[in-house]
Structure formats: structure tokens, C-alpha cells
Image (cartoon, rainbow, N blue to C red):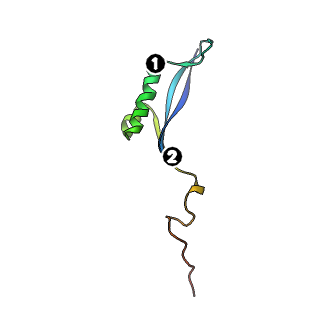
Amino acid sequence: MTRQSSQLVREGEYAAEVIVELNDDGGEWSPTVGPEDIRRLDRVRRALRERDFERAEKDARVYRLVPREADYPKSGFGESEQDGLKS
């Protein structure tokens, strides 16, 4: 029996979602991924490393990872907070 699964490949601040076929034959190592899917995962990883997103998008959906809001400075673009308006 085969079924589709999405595998994530991450390189730096980019991630790609690659759809692969899982072969579940009930054996001791099940489920397994076929050689063509392994080559596809390797192609996507190589493309992300080289920042060739067009090539990666031929086999996957590509995402740019953004740090959580807590990791950003609270005052906007890294500036120090300004005094409020005085009347």
C-alpha cells in the first residue's frame, strides 16, 4: 500500500514541503521512501542551499522562516523608544 506524505526540508531560514510516496509493505522497515523521492528531497535541499528558489519550487512549496515576535525588538525597527509628544 502506498500513501502520500509531506516531508520538510530545512536549510537556514528557508524550508520546503516535498510530497513523497510512502511504501507501506508491512515489513520491519516500513514505511519506506522510493529512490526517486529521495533524489527529489536531495534536489530541493541543494537548491535551497544555493538559494535557487525557482529550481526548488519545481519539486516543493518553499517557505521563508520568520522568528517569533518575541525575538524582535519591541520598539519597531531596532530603534530606541522615543519620548511621547509634549504639549
Residue 57, can we see it? no
Residue 41 or residue 12, whichever sits in front: 12
Q: In the image, residue 61 lies at what x, y percent?
A: 47, 36
Crowding near the residue tagged with mark 2, few <14, some 14–19, many ≥20 C-alpha atoms within 10 Å: few
| Residue located at (43% from left, 26% from top) | 40
Left or right position of 73 against 48: right
Most extreme residue toward the bottom is 87
| Residue located at (55% from left, 72% from top) | 81
Say whether disc 1 or disc 2 marks the residue closer to the N-terminus. Answer: 1
SS for tag 2? loop
Q: Are marks 1 and 2 in contact (CB under 8 Å)?
A: no
Tell me which amino acid carries mark 2: Leu
Q: Is residue 40 above or below residue 62?
A: above
On the image, numbered disc 2 is attached to which residue?
65
Q: In the image, residue 17 lies at what x, y percent?
A: 50, 34
Q: How many marks?
A: 2
Name the quadrant of the N terminus: top right
Residue 68 or residue 19, whichever sits in front: 68
| Residue located at (39% from left, 39% from top) | 53
Q: Is residue 37 above or below residue 51?
A: above
Crowding near the residue tagged with mark 1, few <14, some 14–19, many ≥20 C-alpha atoms within 10 Å: few
Residue 52, can we see it? yes
Left or right position of 46 against 15: left
Q: In the image, residue 62 lies at what x, y percent?
A: 46, 39
Tell me which amino acid carries mark 1: Pro
SS for tag 1? helix
On the image, numbered disc 1 is attached to which residue?
35
| Residue located at (48% from left, 45% from top) | 13
Q: How far apart are the two marked residues, 1 and 2, measured between alpha carbons?
A: 28 Å
**Residue 18 numbered mark, or none:** none
Name the quadrant of the C terminus: bottom right
Q: In the image, residue 82 lies at what x, y percent?
A: 54, 75
